[in-house]
Amino acid sequence: MKLGVFDSGIGGLTVVKSLLSHNLFSEIIYYGDTARVPYGIKDKNTIIRYAIEAVEFFKNFDLDLIIVACNTVSAHALNEMRETANCPVIGVVDAGVQATVNALSSKDANILIMATKATIKSHAYESELNARGYNNLTSVASGLLVPIVEEEIYSGEVLESTLRHYFKDVVHPDAIILGCTHFPLISHAISEFFHDNTTLIHSGDAIVELLEREFVFKERYPEPNLKFFASENPESLRNIAKKWLGLESL
C-alpha cells in the first residue's frame, strides 16, 4: 500500500505519526503546502483550488490512497478532490466524527469542537454529529493555537492564556474534537485545562481506526519508505518531521 498524506503545512505530521505506529503502509509520501499556510483563514473556493493542485501533485506517485490530514480541506474540498483523484481519498472529519460516536455512550454528551475558523464556518463536524443525534455541541474557532504550536510552545503561560481566552466560558465537555492536526501536540495542556476529565478525539488515531475498519491490510511494514515534500522550504519540513516523528534521518 502506497499512501499520500496532504496537509496545508506541518500539522498533518501528527497523522503520519499515528500511521507509523501501526505499520499500515509500505510507502508514505507527505505533501505540505507550506508556501500558502494557513488555510484556516481562506475562503472555500481558494481552499478547493489548492486542494485540487495537491491531487495533481500526487498523480506523480501512483498512489493507492490519499489521506487529507487537514481538517479545513476535509471540510471544504473533499468531494472535489475525490472527483479529480485517481485513487480513493479520505479525510479527517469523517474519521473524527466516527471516532467521537464510538467514544461516547450517550447522545446527550457535551462535545467541544476546537478548530480553525474555516473548519468551524463549514459546520462539517456539527452537521455530521447532528445527523447522528448529537446536539449538545459547542464550536470554538481557536486558530491562534496553530502558530503557538508551530513555535513549539507546548506548555507555559502563553499557551495557558490562549486556552483561557478561548475556553474559559465553555461548559465542561465530555469529549473534545481536536479539529486541527496541530492540536494533538498540545493535547496534554488541553487535557489539564479541562482537569484531565474529558475524552480527546485525535485525527491521527481516528484515521487509523477508520482505515483498519474499512480496508484489509494483509501485510505490516515496520520500516516504510518516507518521502516529504513542501511547496516552500522542504528542508524545514523534513527537520520538523524528524523531530516530531522521532526519526534520526530522512
Image (cartoon, rainbow, N blue to C red):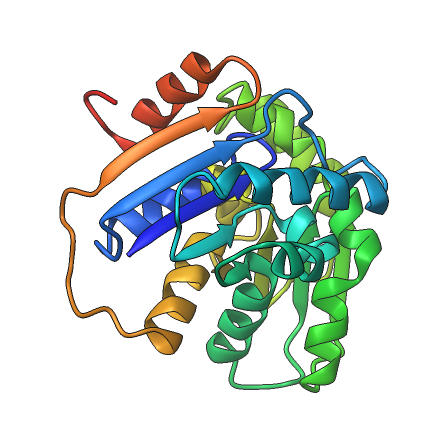
- State the residue at coordinates (52%, 36%): 11
Residue 216: percent from left, percent from top: 27, 74
Residue 90 in the image: above or below residue 19: below
Rendered location of residue 122, percent (x, y): 81, 57
The residue positioned 37% from the left and 62% from the top of the image is 208
246, 57: nearer the viewer: 57
Vertical order, 160 against 55 (above or below)? above
Place of residue 160 in the rendered image (x, y in percent of width and height, measured from the top left): 61, 32
**Residue drawn 30% across the image and 24% down it:** 242
Q: Residue 132, percent across and down?
A: 67, 85
Depth check, front residue: 199 or 150: 150
Say which quadrant the N terminus sits in. Answer: bottom left
Number of marks drawn? 0
Residue 249 showing in the rendered view: yes
Q: Is residue 25 left or right of residue 183?
A: left
Q: Is residue 169 left or right of residue 164?
A: right
Q: Look at the picture and state if 97 lies above or below 59.
A: below
Q: Quadrant of residue 131?
A: bottom right
Q: Would residue 60 appear left or right of 241 to someone viewing this image?
A: right
Residue at 59 percent of width and 24 percent of height: 34
Of residues 195 and 21, the one drawn nearer to the viewer in this rendering: 21
* Apparent side of residue 104 relative to residue 124 in the rendered image (left or right): left
Q: Quadrant of the C terminus?
A: top left
Residue 168 visible somewhere in the drawing:
no
- Where residue 43 sits, quadrant-wise, is top right
